[in-house]
Image: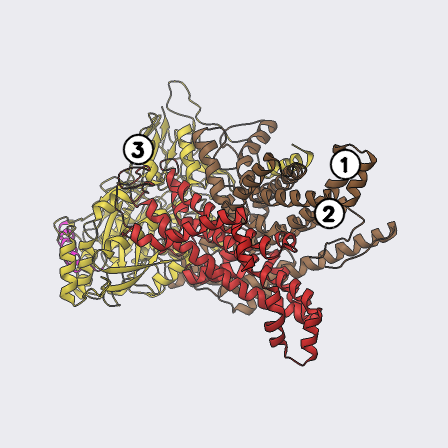
């Protein structure tokens, strides 16, 4: 990643354009490589989708199978299939799903909002709450509340994300019956838009919290040590000497500088977060891309599998973009992308 | 909630699509007509045209839209469908069906004998593999008048009369499909049939909305105004929907086996396992007869003795079903119960294995066999674990292999397995659903649900072939009893359980399960209250 | 030995070590404590904890949960360590090559590493296990294949730092081949942070394995903690103990490893402690 030093407003504009161009290039490259990689891997395995479709109808025979193979293009050699696939991706044609009888793109677009909602909420939740808790712990370093904080964050960090989800369901849905255990919306009940939003929010709460928890712990601990380190630096002592009040110091000076490493790490963890969405969506029957991944894997639905992996990787790239933007927003003086 | 979240939710709410789904039941006081039935379809079917796709959900839903000539009661005797009467010639070669006079398709066109002939001899022959197996025996078909169909067979085939349910021979409109590419025909999206309900709307991922076909040929039917099939992929959500009354009917595995007992206790629901007699699914342990030691009859018998099938039924199937005694299900015609009994006996199993020369090694194992776990759900996983423990006790070490759907289909159909579990339907008559597993001529590589075990016995072949073309039921029973006794002695595969499925029906609903295909029927007679 | 003494005095590290030793002991003595196969259906189904003979209850087929946890410890530790070794091997080799040679080679290696970090790792693991088949070996390979990037980055950073040091340059001037320089001079000095990150990777590997087993993608012949939680999901209402106890087992093990790792970190390299934790 290029490090571009900025020294003037004009320079800033150019840098933004260059950054975006860099992003696009990376985007396209990643998409193509992932597509090829996925395709090779998936086709290297045994199993034939035509068989499954035929087998389900009661009694299959060779005529039906070859019919299906021709219809779904399974009888062409792999390199030809791959080349056509790559060409089609670049024109946004992601193929047709054997099992679901619809274009992959429409399947992905249908499930995308749910996953974006989940991962987006979890990401922001983890970042915001983590930063706040970490700051509080950092300024109270050494006190009992700090110790409590450390213990809790250590526990959260060690939990398997799906187990946390199950435990939350056990407590809040089965025992207390405060929140729904699964799904996206309550079916069969007519609702006003406002009620509908509240309904979705109540379904979103547990999955988002489960997914966010681990990263929350990471960011909080990181923020804490970052805050402690910044607090001991000279310019803070100067501020204190000048007579500035503590809250002002925190907000204006400490926070801004301490948050930068956290944002960087958040970007690096984006891949893990999106991967975690697969398990959470399975646990909570959340109708997003993660759930689709699992179903497609089970059914060996090639086009959907490839489409989902692609889509998930793109979400990761987008999250990286977001963290980079946040980073720049917080401190435009510094490089566009911290060297790792 | 900040602006960003709000906007996201707005995006999402729009994508999901809110209202417009009628809520629950509308009860017209004192009358039995009208109302909406809410039920579940799981998983969501790929299309609704049953002639083109015979996967489970398509058949369940499609039965309301497409009818066939006959229906079958719980004893699998034919009763009128689109045909009001029928005749079979004494030599068993000529079948004459008289259709009801006033049948119309959903687009208003009358249904005539030509549509029947087109469906049976042209379209289904190309698109419906199972129907093809039966209708290939048709030599010629004629329509002496618009409401009479005459089928002439090449040789007598008694089960021919059992092949006219709406899942095997749905009648489609000739004027829409003749001469076109059936699978790509744009009319497939409208699913035009002649059943009591027609398709109004299909919101993918959400629901399928059917409404009354006003020109339906049976007077007073259908009683219901609408049926809504809801798509609910998660099993726990389905149970909740049933409990809360959001849906009034479930079938097959909509409700998981372990939840059946709990939900049966609810006061507003009836639970019945009737309505699957036509399918009579048979669960068995499939042994590849080509590989040692499974090619030895003694080994197979030992396996049969070593498995406590009653315990399997209780622990894994939660009591939903019956222990299987042989190749023919007790619900299928010509079932013979007087066959060799294999009680649960570890000693007998060990004796047989010793007799074969398979002695236990130092670690107690006699032989190691890979077992392919079918990825069709929890029941198969738990069964695999149960079987491993059971066979482990007599020294047969099962190594479980996980695999995906396509992989399982490929390995099973290409004989690349040693042991696996399989579930096969019987379709009411041994000639239609049972013989295909045991006859030599159906050992076809690459085809699922054929004779994949590779068992070959000329005596069995002879008995099945004669029984298929015999013209009297008494003669057929005699032959089928003989072949069942023979097969149970030979045990080509280890029959485990005749699986039952629970239908949950709201007490307000009437006439839901009236035939041997249960919820796959047209629902013309179903009413609320 | 100074490091060892320092570690023994590190409070949280010691707590972690104690827990970890307990887990390892449980794994080692499992056959003695629970002589029956954990897959054996020894009791009635759905027995709650503290039923007779079943400390932690039984599952839906009547299997002993406590036995499952003891034998599950073996599986988790085995897979955790084995896949970490694989990841360390791959990561160190790639990072070493990148850091030592620099320039174009470095660019290429880093692009590859970045690629692997952009693809959601867990999804890649699912893809690999599904493609290759759910067996023990394949699970280890899959987890190793998604865990190496942080190790590669770390190794590279260390190598870059040490490459410029005088004693290394001296060795190069002497004409020693790159392989020897790396093995004799650079690696020994880079080893501490690698050990720390490696031990933390064991924890991540155990978490990934449990997630894979939970989703039914693990080896079906192995009774692992993730598998137990996965099997419990549909019957959570009836039998909460089937999901709670295996989860606690994972939690404690991962926590212990993390504590030990951080203890090692603090004692081995106080200087770059912070940098390692942010990697």
User: Residue C246 location in percent, x, y?
Assistant: 41, 45
Residue position marked by numbered label 2 in the rendering:
A327
What chain does badge 1 belong to? A
Q: Provide the residue span drawn in magenta.
A: B474-492
Q: Main secondary structure of the magenta part?
A: helix
What chain does badge 3 belong to? B
Chain A drawn in what color?
A: brown
Depth check: give the residue in front, A323 or A89.
A323
Above or below residue A16? Residue A210 is above
Tell which tag, 1 or 2, sits nearer the viewer. Answer: 1
Residue position marked by numbered label 3 in the rendering:
B271
| Mark 1 residue element | helix
Give the CA separation, mark 1 to mark 2.
Answer: 20 Å
Residue position marked by numbered label 1 in the rendering:
A249
Above or below residue C50? Residue B477 is below
**Chain in yellow on the image:** B
Residue C243: name its quadrant. Answer: top left
Q: Is residue A192 visible?
A: yes
């Amino acid at each position: 990643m290029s490090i571009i030093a900025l020294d003037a407003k004009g320079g800033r504009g150019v840098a933004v354009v260059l950054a975006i161009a860099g992003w696009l290039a990376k985007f396209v490259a990643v998409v193509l490589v992932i597509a090829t990689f996925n395709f090779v891997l998936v086709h290297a395995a045994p199993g034939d989708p035509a068989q499954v479709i035929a087998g389900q109808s009661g009694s299959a025979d060779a005529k039906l199978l070859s019919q299906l193979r021709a219809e779904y293009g399974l009888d062409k050699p792999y390199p030809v299939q791959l080349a056509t696939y790559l060409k089609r991706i670049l024109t946004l044609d992601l193929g047709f799903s054997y099992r679901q009888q619809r274009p992959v793109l429409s399947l992905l677009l249908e499930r995308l909002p749910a996953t974006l909602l989940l991962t987006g909420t979890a990401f922001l939740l983890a970042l915001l709450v983590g930063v706040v808790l970490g700051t509080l712990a950092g300024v109270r370093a050494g006190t009992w509340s700090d110790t409590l904080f450390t213990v809790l964050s250590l526990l959260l960090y060690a939990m398997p994300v799906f187990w946390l989800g199950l435990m939350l369901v056990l407590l809040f849905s089965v025992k207390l019956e405060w929140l729904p255990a699964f799904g996206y919306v309550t079916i069969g009940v007519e609702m006003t838009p406002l009620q509908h939003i509240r309904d979705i929010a109540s379904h979103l709460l547990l999955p988002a919290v489960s997914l966010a928890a681990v990263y929350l712990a990471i960011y909080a601990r990181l923020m804490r040590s970052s805050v402690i380190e910044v607090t001991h630096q000279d310019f803070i002592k100067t501020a204190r000497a000048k007579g500035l009040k503590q809250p002002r110091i925190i907000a204006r000076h400490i926070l801004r500088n301490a948050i930068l490493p956290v944002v960087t790490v958040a970007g690096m963890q984006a891949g893990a977060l999106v991967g975690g969405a697969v398990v959470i969506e399975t646990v909570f029957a959340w109708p997003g891309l993660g759930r689709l991944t699992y179903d497609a894997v089970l059914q060996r639905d090639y086009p959907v599998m490839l489409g989902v992996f692609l889509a998930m990787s793109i979400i990761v790239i987008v999250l990286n973009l977001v963290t980079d933007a946040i980073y720049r927003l917080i401190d435009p003086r510094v490089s566009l992308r911290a060297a790792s | 909630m900040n602006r960003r979240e709000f906007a996201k939710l707005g995006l999402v709410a729009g994508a999901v699509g809110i209202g417009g789904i009628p809520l629950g039941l509308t009860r017209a006081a004192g009358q039995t007509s009208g109302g909406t039935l809410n039920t579940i379809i799981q998983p969501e079917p790929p299309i609704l045209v049953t002639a083109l796709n015979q996967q489970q959900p398509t058949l369940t839903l499609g039965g309301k839209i497409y009818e066939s000539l006959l229906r079958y009661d719980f004893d699998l005797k034919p009763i009128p469908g689109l045909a009001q009467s029928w005749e079979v010639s004494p030599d068993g070669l000529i079948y004459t069906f008289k259709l009801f006079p006033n049948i119309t398709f959903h687009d208003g066109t009358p249904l005539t004998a030509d549509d029947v002939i087109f469906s049976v001899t042209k379209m289904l022959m190309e698109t419906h593999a199972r129907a093809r197996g039966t209708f290939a025996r048709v030599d010629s078909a004629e329509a002496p008048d618009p409401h009479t169909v005459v089928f002439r067979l090449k040789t007598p085939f008694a089960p021919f009369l059992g092949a006219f349910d709406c899942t095997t021979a749905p009648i489609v409109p000739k004027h829409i499909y003749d001469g076109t590419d059936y699978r790509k025909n744009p009319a497939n999206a409208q699913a035009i049939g002649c059943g009591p309900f027609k398709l109004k709307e299909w919101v993918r991922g959400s629901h399928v909305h059917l409404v009354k076909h006003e020109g339906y040929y049976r007077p007073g039917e259908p009683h219901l105004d609408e049926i809504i099939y809801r798509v609910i992929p998660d099993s726990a959500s389905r149970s909740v929907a049933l409990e809360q009354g959001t849906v009034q009917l479930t079938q097959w595995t909509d409700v998981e086996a372990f939840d059946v007992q709990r939900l049966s206790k609810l006061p507003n629901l009836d639970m019945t396992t009737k309505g699957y007699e036509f399918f009579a699914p048979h669960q068995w342990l499939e042994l590849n007869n080509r590989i040692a030691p499974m090619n030895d009859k003694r080994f197979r018998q030992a396996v049969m003795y070593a498995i406590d099938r009653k315990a399997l039924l209780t622990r894994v199937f939660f009591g939903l079903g019956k222990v299987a005694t042989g190749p023919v299900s007790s619900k299928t015609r010509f079932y013979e119960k007087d066959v060799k009994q294999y009680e649960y006996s570890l000693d007998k199993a060990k004796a047989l294995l010793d007799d074969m020369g398979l002695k236990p090694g130092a670690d107690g194992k006699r032989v190691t066999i890979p077992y392919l776990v079918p990825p069709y759900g929890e029941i198969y996983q738990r069964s695999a674990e149960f079987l491993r423990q059971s066979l482990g006790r007599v020294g047969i070490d099962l190594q479980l292999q996980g695999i995906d759907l396509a992989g399982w289909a490929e390995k099973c159909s290409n004989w690349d397995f040693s042991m696996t579990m399989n579930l096969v339907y019987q379709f009411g008559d041994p000639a239609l659903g049972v013989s295909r597993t045991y006859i030599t001529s159906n050992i076809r590589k690459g085809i699922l649900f054929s004779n994949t075990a590779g068992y070959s016995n000329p005596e069995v072949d002879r008995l099945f072939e004669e029984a298929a073309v015999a013209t009297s039921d008494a003669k057929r029973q005699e032959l089928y009893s003989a072949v069942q006794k023979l097969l149970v002695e030979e045990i080509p595969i280890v029959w485990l359980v005749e699986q039952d499925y629970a239908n949950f029906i709201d007490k307000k609903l009437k006439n839901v399960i009236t035939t041997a295909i249960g919820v796959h029927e047209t629902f013309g007679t179903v009413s609320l209250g | 030995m100074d490091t060892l003494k320092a570690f023994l005095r590190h409070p949280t590290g010691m707590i972690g070590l104690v827990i970890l030793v307990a887990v390892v002991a449980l794994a080692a003595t499992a056959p003695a404590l629970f002589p029956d196969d954990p897959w054996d259906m020894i009791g009635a189904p759905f027995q709650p904890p503290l039923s007779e003979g079943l400390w932690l209850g039984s599952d839906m087929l009547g299997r002993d949960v406590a036995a499952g946890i003891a034998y599950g410890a073996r599986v988790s530790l085995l897979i955790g360590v084995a896949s970490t070794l694989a990841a360390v091997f791959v990561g160190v080799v790639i990072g070493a090559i990148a850091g030592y040679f620099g320039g174009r080679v470095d660019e290429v290696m880093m692009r590859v590493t970045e690629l692997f970090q952009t693809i959601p790792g867990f999804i890649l693991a699912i893809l690999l296990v599904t493609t290759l088949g759910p067996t023990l070996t394949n699970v280890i390979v899959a987890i190793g294949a998604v865990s190496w990037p942080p190790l590669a980055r770390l190794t590279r950073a260390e190598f870059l730092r040490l490459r410029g040091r005088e004693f290394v340059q001296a060795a190069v001037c002497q004409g020693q081949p790159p392989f020897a320089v790396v093995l004799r001079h650079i690696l020994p000095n880079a080893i501490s942070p690698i050990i720390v990150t490696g031990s933390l990777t064991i924890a991540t590997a155990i978490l990934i394995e449990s997630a894979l087993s939970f989703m039914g993608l693990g080896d079906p012949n192995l009774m692992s903690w993730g598998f137990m939680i996965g099997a419990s999901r549909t019957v959570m209402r009836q039998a909460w103990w089937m999901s709670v106890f295996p989860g606690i087992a994972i939690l404690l093990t991962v926590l212990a490893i993390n504590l030990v790792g951080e203890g090692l970190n603090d004692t081995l390299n106080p200087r770059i402690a912070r940098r390692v934790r942010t990697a």
